Amino acid sequence: MSEQQALLWREASTTARTRQAPRGREVLETPAYSIGETARYLDVPTATLRYWVLGGPYRTQRGIKRAAPIIQLADPSERLLSFLNLVEAHVLDALRRHHEVSLPKVRAALDYLARSDVGPHRHPLADPSLQTDGLDLFVDHYGQLINASRAGQTAMRAMLEAHLRRIDRNPAGAPVRLYPFTRKHDAEEPRVVMMDPRVQYGRPVLVGSGIPTAVIAERYKAGESIQDLAADYGRGPEEIEEAIRCELRLAEAA
């Protein structure tokens, strides 16, 4: 390991131990991610995410209307998302995987859910009800609005469930950790990379180490082998490969 690479390792280790963001609900709602940055982390087109968080024009039989955002930005003036916003976008992305998202219809389905006993609150797509009985209510109503077949609704539910399984929640139900997809949004993808707003300011890290995937990828690009990195970090080669894969995908999206 070169002197520069050793310095990167020491800095990352120190950060993982001592430079964690404050705990509590406020850290979940702190503006921390730009639209472009979030789009790269979630592998969502930037224009699509911008439409979700800023709204925009859409065509109807009566002419052009403007859709309000479906995700309420933590900082609208600076156009910054919070960790909760990030989770909401992660869940909304599941609908985009099977259907062209119509914000008015998504909003109508969420409004329907809000009128039920399990209704969501300020961050409906991050609400714990979506992982319980709220999911069926939302999918059934949204499927009716877009005329999705029973098979289409089943596929939609499966994709939503795959996304929801990559969210860890605290005892109160608040999302506290996200395991972003690093491949092709396969439901069986390993949960090796995580994003936690209390660790490295919510940037991707290798699970169980707090080491930024960016540091691992930087060492790999500098010429160190996967086997050497695995030995240094005490992790399996497949975990190192996953961290590198995450950063390579982010670089391609930049």
Image (cartoon, rainbow, N blue to C red):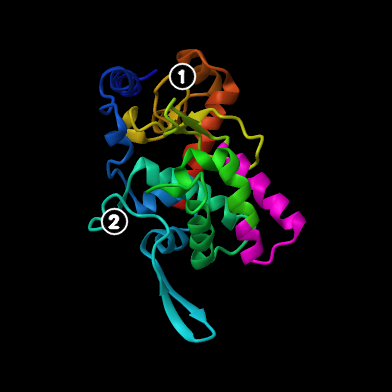
For label 2, count other residues whose C-alpha is less than 10 Å away and answer few (under 14), some (14-19) or many (20+): some
Q: CA distance from mark 2 to mark 1?
A: 31 Å
Few, some or many C-alpha atoms within 10 Å of disc 1 (few <14, some 14-19, many ≥20)? few
Q: Residue at x 46, y 42 (%)?
A: 127
**Residue under pointer 1:** 208
* Residue 65 drawn at (x, y percent): 43, 79
* Amino acid at pointer 1: Gly
Which residue is at a point 52% across and 52% down the rendered structure image?
A: 113
Q: Amino acid at mark 2?
A: Arg
Q: Nearer the viewer, residue 208 or 119?
A: 119
Labels 2 and 1 touching (C-beta < 8 A): no
The overriding secondary structure of the stretch rendered in magenta is helix
**In this figure, what is the number of numbered marks?**
2
Question: Is residue 137 depicted above or below 231 in this figure?
Answer: below
Q: Is residue 251 visible?
A: no
Q: Nearer the viewer, mark 2 or mark 1?
A: 2
Q: Which residue is mark 2?
A: 79
Locate residue 175 relative to residue 241 in the image: left or right: left
Q: Nearer the viewer, residue 226 or 29?
A: 29
**Dividing the picture into quarters, in which one does residue 187 lie?**
top right
> Could you tell me which secondary element the residue under label 1 belongs to?
loop
Which of the pair 160/200 is nearer the observer?
Answer: 160
The quadrant in which the N terminus is found is top left
Nearest the viewer among 75 and 145 is 145
Q: What range of the chain is rendered magenta?
A: 141-164
Q: Earlier in the sequence, mark 2 or mark 1?
A: 2
Q: Residue drawn 50% across and 12% down?
A: 234
| Residue 151 on image: x %, y % | 76, 55
Point 45% across, 82% down: residue: 64
Is 150 within the magenta? yes
